Amino acid sequence: MKALRFYALVVAGLVLFPFVIHPIGGYPALATQILIVSIATMGLNLLVGYAGLLSYGQAMFYGVGAYMALLTISKFFPDHPNFWLALTLAIGFVTLMALLIGSLVVRLYGIYFALLTLAFAQMFFFIVFKWRDLTQGDDGISGVSIPPLPLGLTSLDLTTAFPPLDLGIFGNLSDVKYWYAFVAIVALGVLAFVRTLTQSQFGEVLGAIRENEGRSTFVGFEPARYKLAAFTIAGALTGLSGALRAMFDTSISPDALTVETSGNFVIYAVVGGVKTLLGPFAGTTIILFLQNVVSAKTDNWRLFEGIIFVLVIVFLPGGILGTFKRKRSRALLSETIRTTPPHDATQPTAGGAAL
Amino acid sequence: MPGQILDGFIHGLVYVAIALGLTIVFGMLRLVNFSHGAFYAIGAYVGYAVTERFGLIAGLIAAPIAVALFAFIYDRALLRYFYEKDTTAQILLTFGVAIVVEETLRLIFGGTTRTYTIGAVLSGSLNLGFITYPTYRVGLAVGIIILILAVYFFIERTDYGLIVRAGVRDRTMVQLLGGNVAQASTVIFVLGASLAGFVGAAASPIYDVDPGTGFQFLVPSFVVIVIGGLGSFWGAVIGGLIVGELQSLTGLLFPPGADVVIYVAMALVLLIKPTGLFGQSEIIGR
């Protein structure tokens, strides 16, 4: 019942999202990009929030997924470009990559883990940057024509707009492309996957390892396996996100693999609130939306981003949703205390027993 | 070839000077400072602004002072509240501050690359017997080596150094014995920062300055301290020289690999010996 209510609210939110941001300067393409990037942030949240592993190298999965998708269409199979094939190859390759890198990095903790993921990301950045024959170096790949999405017997061109319908201050239904619907369904699927995962035994063991790795080992779990699984899933989700983003933008450049990109995922996750299910959505939405608004007026967006990030770290260490959640549970707690009569008032003689 | 080795050596020395601050602060406070590159960048820009007006000597004096001041305020106002927090919170805070500093520098100085104007004497070349090499680079190398030795003697021979070395081993015990670890920590932090600030000004006539400079030098400096061993003094020195030479010589033999090779080296070290070449948590590796 609780799950049903959760999903009903999320679906309603996804349907309304491209329209409610219209009056405050948003537009459907931005909504699409936000949802796509949120998928990567959800992956990172699984690592940082649930497994307690701060990765500074998520850009490698994002970038490689993006390049794989576009190269599959334009270079590997130019005669038979296929949407699903591009997506499958991208995710498959990145998953394998995450599994291999993960098996090396999950043995490390804290700063060593952060620095080793950073090192791997730098390797992939320079490989993509220098391998001009394949990736066109710093020019990047652009203008790739994305094949329609095959669905059974027919196929759907995702750049098609919905039929026109005037919605007043919320814009027009025809502003929204099929891309948004497709991405919303994928994001919903990812959310359901992450929710199931974190509420399963897997999620609980992950939390136990985060809190006390030694003790969880004594109980009989193998921390390295759980961490590797989390790292691989996070990598795969980030690869999916990168592939979708590249196909939506029809272009990609090595910027997708920089330290700055890796850092951005960390910013989205932390601002929204790690260890919360919807935090990644909240963080990605707030930052990307502000970026869009502020960039239109000044060149100094990144200064704003840095200041917001520092303010969140100093004043809202749980992130925006995390702080909200804690406030609410504290309010509930004080409510319970207030409505429960104190023992010594009603039963003065039981005071000793209560101690 | 000898030119390449010398270039790598100088590059390595710059990394050493940046990495020393990183590694000592890590040893002392268990703090990994993602904003350490910002000290280099502030030094580079302050040095630039002062050099353009009053000459290079003034620039080289102003840069470390300005950075020391910044680092002191930063430490007292913000960073000290994060000393006791977990690694993740420290990384996130210092990463955020690094962005703010970088972007503030961009706001003040613009996004274009700045080049120092140095005097005609320093722009010349020196005959070293086996090679003719730019005078400025020779001077830079000598200057950094003197600084490294000065830091070594400060830590090894002074009372402060004693507290620092002991604080690395056992913070609580030093406090119980009456050593002011908190003050020593701040002194060490400011010292490491001003060292990076000085090198920012001193190295920029060679490498130029732009707002991204801080991160450009920070990331390889992480490689340096990981290879050398986090917290190790001589580890940072040897690690810096290894990284400088690796970059330079790979650039000669296989140019596309020049930037990748140091990360491969770092990954190998972390995977084979995570504590680095010179072990862990020793400021003076013996």
Image (cartoon, coloured by chain):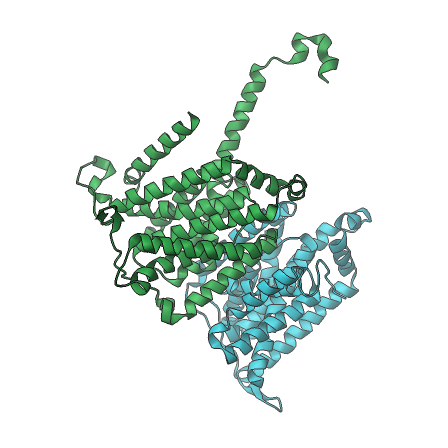
Chain colours: A green, B cyan
Where is residue A33? Give x, y as percent. Answer: 34, 48
Quarter of the C terminus of chain B within the rendering: bottom right
Relative placement, left or right, of A330 versus A162 is: right
Where is residue B219? Give x, y as percent. Answer: 54, 62
Above or below, comparing residue A302 to residue B18 in the picture? above
Relative placement, left or right, of A168 versus A279 is: left
Where is residue B153? Give x, y as percent. Answer: 75, 68
Residue extending farthest to the bottom is B129
Above or below, comparing residue A168 to residue A100 in the picture? above
Question: Is residue B247 visible from the viewing direction of this image?
Answer: yes
Above or below, comparing residue A221 to residue A4 in the picture? below
Q: Give the image quarter of residue A186.
A: top left
Relative placement, left or right, of A96 versus A211 is: left
Quarter of the N terminus of chain B within the rendering: bottom right
Q: Give the image quarter of residue B160.
A: bottom right
Question: Is residue B43 visible from the viewing direction of this image?
Answer: no
| Residue at 60% in and 64% down | B268
| Residue at 57% in and 83% down | B135
Front one among A76 and B91:
A76
Where is residue B101? Give x, y as percent. Answer: 50, 56
Residue extending farthest to the front is A153
| Residue at 52% in and 46% down | A230
| Residue at 39% in and 28% down | A4
Front one among B273 and A97:
A97
Residue extending farthest to the right is B177
How many numbered discs?
A: 0
